[in-house]
Amino acid sequence: LYVHSKLLIADDRVVICGSANLNDRSQLGDHDSEIAICIEDPREIDSYMAGRPWRATEFAASLRRQLFRKHLGLLPPQEVTRPDRNFEPIGVPNAYDWGSREDEAVIDPLSLDFLSLWNTTARTNTEAFERVFHPVPSDKVRNWKQYDKYFSRFFPTGKDAKEARGKDAEKPSQWKLGHVVAEEFPGGVAEVKDVLSMIRGTLVEMPLLFLKEEDMAKEGLTLNAMTEEIYT
């Protein structure tokens, strides 16, 4: 499972946004056509790249910094009693708080300080989400045995889910997907909130080791713990 991005920001100078695949769907012209745009802003600003002074362009730099801050949880809340340009509909350029503390934190995407902030935030968020919600894919799951221990026994799917209905609620728990496994939090809701309070933004680590010990190419789309729900 990989991120399917439609945005490329190069060197804080050029933005390529969208998709322009040459396929039948895109060339029919009457539905679901795909386009891409390349934006090169002539307005240059002083910035940094890999610890050195760098000439970036205003649009590309502000877009990249805004997105990074969103992922890191560094965007300020909008004050509803003090509307600004960011409240306006499409057509009005957004305002950006150049030089703010949060802006300075993401100004250089290759600096050691930024990389530390990025990686630490991703790790902390990932650990918090895994602690509370048992999401998959996860690097904690390297084989089917670990998949069952980490996920399936709490969140049954397919036939197992049907058999789980009507069971004694006091026995080993089984939960709806996305729900909290209550017995893992003896402190109740307060303990869950304490863990979730560590999350900043939306950034998480890419689970590159998920089912690493299994030969997924060999198994293909055969019936297994992941595909059972699809087939049943």
Image (spheres, rainbow, N blue to C red):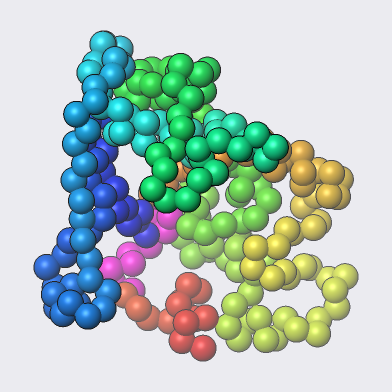
Residue visible at 24% across and 25% down in the picture: 43
Residue visible at 52% across and 59% down in the picture: 136
State whether residue 66 is above or below residue 202: above
Question: Can residue 200 be seen at all in this image of the molecule?
Answer: no
Residue 110 in the image: x percent, y percent? 32, 22
Residue 206 in the image: x percent, y percent? 42, 46
**104 with respect to 180 (left or right):** left
Q: Quadrant of residue 3?
A: bottom left
Please state which of residues 27 and 162 is positioned toward the viewer in this rendering: 27
State whether residue 42 is above or below residue 36: above
Q: Is residue 210 magenta?
A: yes
State whether residue 224 is above or below residue 16: below
Residue 116 in the image: x percent, y percent? 45, 23
Question: Can residue 37 be seen at all in this image of the molecule?
Answer: yes
By secondary structure, the bulk of the magenta-drawn segment is best described as loop
Q: Is residue 218 magenta?
A: yes
